[in-house]
Image (tube, rainbow, N blue to C red):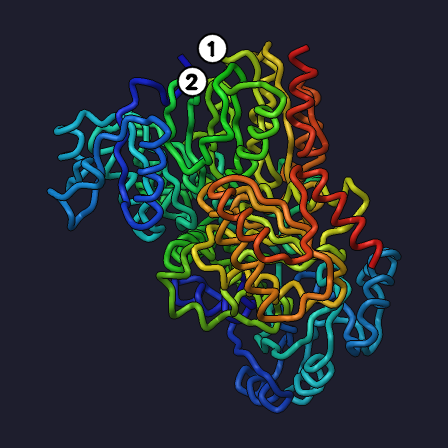
Amino acid sequence: MKLHEYQARDLLAQNGVAVTAGRVASTPAEAKAIAAELGGKVVVKAQIHAGGRGKGRLVSESETAAMYEKLTTDPANNSGQVKGDRVGGVRLADTPEEAEQAAAAILGKHLVSIQTGPEGKLVNRVLVAEQTDIAKEYYLAIIIDGAQGSPLIMASAEGGQEIEVVAANNPGAIIREAINPAAGFEPYVGRTLAASLGFSGDQAAQFSAIAEGLYNTLVASDASLVEINPLAVTDDGRVVAVDAKLTIDDNAMFRHKDLAELRDKTEEDPLEVLAQDLGVANFIKLEGNIGCVVNGAGLAMATMDTIKLAGGEPANFLDIGTVNDPQRVVNALKVILEDESVKAILVNIFGGMARVDIIAQGVIMAHEQMKIDVPVVMRLVGTNLAEGEKLVEESGLPLIRAKELAEAAQKAVEAANAA
Amino acid sequence: MAVLVDAETRLLVQGIGTEGTNHLRRSVAYGTNVVAAIHPRRGGEDVDGIPIFTTAEQAVSATGANVGIIFVPAPGAADAILEEAAAGIPLIVCITEGIPVLDMVKVKAALRATKSTLIGPNCPGVITPGTKTRVGIMPGDVFLPGRVGVVSRSGTLVYEVVAQLTAEGIGQSTCIGVGGDPIIGTPQIEAVRMLNEDPDTDAIVMVGEIGGSAEQEAARYIKEHVKKPVVAFIAGATAPPGRRMGHAGAIISGEDGKAENKKAALRAAGAIVSDSPAEIGITMKKALG
């Protein structure tokens, strides 16, 4: 689960990371009041789950796709040199009135950046934070290194730009330090990183405290990523987090009921929200027209790949998981049928933990409960196959049957093209 | 001989809810020697005559169990793995999906101080058809005894691949589902190494997927050490970047995570890469001549 910048900042601050003063606003009037509290000179930042905000464009919903096309095809549009009233989801304001105007220009608009996708992101909130006079920008993040099985700190003196860009252009500029999970964050880690980045004296101590606070945030919130970019040294010698990104491990949400309320459903695809609400967890909306119901993430991806090789395009990724209740199959089909671009459905089940007969029951129940007006191709193999086949046969439903994966994909593509 | 599990396997099942009990029975029916089960409140009872113990330590000392399979739900799964390791069980197979990644950070670090090997989590388990040893959740009837080893991050793709191999008359030595999580006990490179060193395995199928760099690491090993034919497939060529495709580990977040780069690394290592998941069986048949 991704958090907004203002939410991530709060968690960082709770764990001892120095962040700039500021608060979130959802109206221009609130933004004005917060700016007044902060002394007038502030930065107003759109809160969306995507980067590239500063160079993004604020447009109406109907204009997002065209703007995205413009931003992604012509690099000049994304150079940061372009000025104009619609340019920039991050704005400086020198007075509370200017903060109000900036918030008014941002709130309620769709922000399109090279990272938002063609739909852009509707801006419902802005962060109003103190302006900092930045002397130098750094990068500091902790990820989980799967291969080593440990948290890994990544830091760079080349902050303020995408770390992927640094990694591509100057990989030597990224310092990596693994944390021994049994020992946790020992002070030497902070000292070592601070020295490698060129900090000394009081600033080295400030940096170490921030790095330790970042690690504590990761552990306390079960994050899979925490990132400060930029981490700034100000003209008056403070080390402070100017931006923050945090992703919480979905698998750990069961022990973070308090963090669940930080989820912003408006950031997610409506079909994916519907799927989650119906208990169909692993659903991702894609651009094609063949709906997929598959068990297992690997087979679900392989099914998408096979559809593509057969000349079609999958409408979604869906791993239905281990199904004990046929209603989950009904719900999965309900979500897929909500997608108007779907012209055919491919059900591909290789039962192991999942039982083929339960899936068959679900498909039959779905036909009883709702109108399914697109062709359904069904391939069943594995655990309880005989029972499943019997159910399908007795139902008399006009399902298109397939035995092999390639055959199933081919039939689904043909059915979608014929529609 | 095969690898990891064989006729010497004495299986312990931890987590005997609906799924655990169901698969305990399926393993028994397949011909596997299941010697014990664990349930914290049902010690002294039995499942179809197989004794239930309260702790792994009791189960090991009473039955000599040497392989443990875990079906415990995610919040308690790390604890179950560490309990089995503390009881000295050499091979632990964790089926559980959805374990928090920081729990696995802890487990991985703790296991370094033990002699236990972990397969999984979030995996279908390990099966050696030749000795009828099923330590997992796979449908036993698609497997055929033989001499091709299979390694896969995905469970259902193991079944898919094996069904294709079996249809071509190609049997399997041992099939290892290493698991779909970002932190797993035995990465693909280790599983490939085991099969490479196994005299009863003549060829290897490796099924990877997008995300991480485990396939590239396996490719480096293959290039240097593997003379046996390797057929590979990478799932997720059509997956969009930045999205978690079901498996927590299946998210493209860097160049190594992309299917095309994994395929290129494997091709450069001498593996035969099938672009279609539907053609793995036939590709292996050709490779074996």
Decide which of A11, A263 is in the foreground and name it.
Answer: A263
Horizontal placement of B137 versus A381: left or right? left
Asked if the residues shown at circle 2 and circle 1 are in contact, with their CB atoms under 8 angstroms apart, the answer is yes
Q: Secondary structure at mark 1?
A: loop
Mark earlier in primary sequence (2, 1): 2
Q: Using the image, determine if residue A272 lies above or below residue A290.
A: below
Q: Are marks 2 and 1 on the same chain?
A: yes
Residue drawn at point x = 74 percent, y = 49 percent = A412
How many residues crowd around disc 2 within 10 Å: few (fewer than 14), some, or many (20 or more)? some
Instruction: Give the residue type at disc 1.
Output: Asp
Q: Using the image, determine if residue B3 lies above or below residue B21.
A: above
Residue A242 placement (x, y as % from top left): 57, 64
Q: What residue is pinned by disc 1?
A: B200
Residue A195 placement (x, y as % from top left): 48, 42
Residue B213 placement (x, y as % from top left): 58, 34
Q: Mark number for residue B130?
A: 2
Residue A256 placement (x, y as % from top left): 38, 64
